[in-house]
Image (cartoon, rainbow, N blue to C red):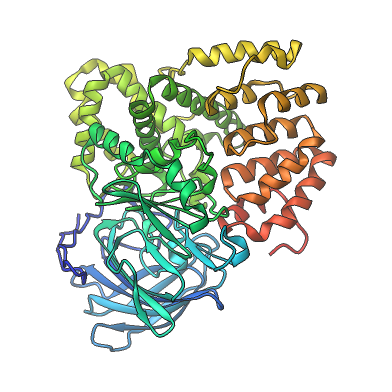
Amino acid sequence: MLAACSGKSPSSVTPTRQVAPVLADETARDVHSYAQPLSARVQHVDLDLTADFAAKTLSGTASLDIEAQPSVTELLLDTRDLNIESVQDAGGTTLPWVLAQPDVVLGAKLTVTVGSARRITVRYRTSPTAAALQWLTPAQTAGKQHPYLFSQGEAILTRTWVPTQDSPGIRQTWTAKITAPEALRVVMSAEQQTPEGERIADARVWRFAMDKPVAPYLIAIAIGDIQFRPLGQRTGVYTEPVMLDAAAAELEDVERMVEAAESLYGPYRWGRYDLLVLPPSFPFGGMENPRLTFATPTILAGDKSLVSLVAHELAHSWSGNLVTNATWADFWLNEGFTTYFENRIMERVYGPDAALMLRQLGWQSLQSELTSLAEKAPADTRLHIDLAGRDPDDGMSDIAYEKGAAFLRSIEAAAGRERFDIYLRGYFDRHAFSPQTTAGFLRDLNEHLLAADATLEARINTHAWAYDSGLPQTAVAPQSPRFAQLDALAAQFVSRGAVALGEVKGWNTAERVHLLQGLPRKLSAARLQELDTAMGLSATHNSEVRFAWLRLAIANRYSPAVPQLEAFLGDQGRRKFVLPLFTALMEQGNWGKPIAQRIYAATRSGYHSVTVGSVDKVVPLPNAH
């Protein structure tokens, strides 16, 4: 590891800036970055940017503090679609730089001849089509009055708006000065140092500081008509004014979730935990940006039934943000740990029966993913996967989430929950604010847990879990007694109709989704109509239930559900829902393809680039660009 040094962040409280190590072993080499961090690495980024909504650009400077070997005179940075104007050292002297031809996945390498300089300033402007940034018109927001901007950096999109070493293993502290139109509020994944902004002419300046080293994909920004409401002493929610009451009511248990998480695995180390509920085009359920989780409005079901997503993003404050996968080949270290941790939070807050049902739904999703990948990419059913030459998005499947969580549950089952909890809390402490690899985790696991009991490794088979395809024989499927009852009801429904279901008004989301997923993909139109009426499926605002219902309807070519499908695909852009629904339509041949193409032609412009990049591969449209 390179030696660490410290400096001062230019914030009002001048906190001591932490510096994270860079892993030196070969397993930590990041094939998705041009950086050579063992020679020269970015330690800190100072952003000074102006948002231009008319031009759809951020422009200004990024000043980078560098740690480098004495003999090193070049710094390699990651960029994509950036207009680089100049590079200077701390004294204002212009430095030579070369921007290479772009790679379709990695973007363009920026080579700066830094000489002996250890702080440089890059002046640049983003592209209007920067993949990390979505510029929304007023019509695309809930309030319909003001434009909106938000970023999504994971996995390697931060390089489209910040010229830095865009690798999760090169953690960086950062500060930002953002100038935006006066009517809009800026929020970022850092300490807010100017709560109301500093007014200048017809604009306001907002300042932020993150004194803890984070992976670059966690640098996030949003600008819009945004208001705040506290949920607790250290928690709160930001969103558009017209959504604030609903969001605050839905998320009122967030403070309890933070307390539950801390009781499991130690103190929350990021100060505040706030959420930003975004406009519906946000492509993910949530994004665990430190101090400020970005969340989709599809979690606002009105009954707190989808708040497990919040538990997931909160858990990332330990697994992912505190201890981060060094490369995207080990994405499961972020998501598998977090999925396991999420369920433990849900168990503490909502009880073991609810948590067990969620585990079984996750297991069912994993089985579907394993079946799909076994045919087209069996190697991608491993936890540690080979992503060389590929987009890291290829590794963002349920394998990382659910197989990873199942691995940790197998360790818990073998070692006992109490011993495993002690281990996991120690793991977060030992590797806080550091990158990690699969090999590093297995070494740590052996040293601090397995070595004390020679029988544990044989009962778990850690190598098979991490490096082999499929599931090891030690994997155990969760079994919810309530789901077994629902399976019997589903079988009776096929023969007897809705009368077999009995009273469904009191069912929770997990129960409804499980029943819908368990029904045959071949049902008569009459049966589907009965189901819709009995469960109120056409009228539901629960996104998970709508999704399960629409998949069943598409499989049965149930035309009465097409208006609901069209509305759902037009109301939100969450890739988890959008991509499978369009895929299912295309698989329905002459019935589904025209519907898919008609809906996608109408909705594509409202989706984030992350969603568009996936759906474009499934639904070909003439002249789409």
Using the rendered view, name the quadrant where residue 42 is placed: bottom left
158 vs 283, nearest the viewer? 283
Picture quarter with the N terminus: bottom left
203 to the left or right of 557 = left
Q: Say above or below: 261 vs 620.
A: above
The quadrant of the image that shows the C terminus is bottom right
Q: 361 or 169: which is nearer to us?
A: 361
Q: Position of residue 516 (x, y in %)?
A: 64, 25
Measuring 32% from the left and 84% from the top, which residue is drawn there? 95
Q: Where is residue 97 drawn, in percent x and y?
A: 38, 80
Is residue 359 placed above or below 436 in the rendered structure? above
Q: Residue at x 26, y 76 (%)?
A: 73
Q: Is 471 rendered above or below residue 576?
A: above
Q: Position of residue 311 (x, y in %)?
A: 39, 38
Does residue 428 appear anywhere in the picture? yes
Residue at 52 percent across and 56 percent down: it is: 242
Decide which of 286, 589 is in the foreground and name it: 286
At 63% across and 45% down in the image, what residue appears?
A: 579
Answer yes or no: is residue 42 visible.
Answer: no
- Residue 27: horizontal and vertical position, in percent? 33, 46
Seen as rendered, the residue at the extreme right is 590
Above or below, 5 against 453 in this view is below
Q: State the count of labels.
A: 0
Of residue 546 and residue 370, the one placed in the foreground of this image is 546
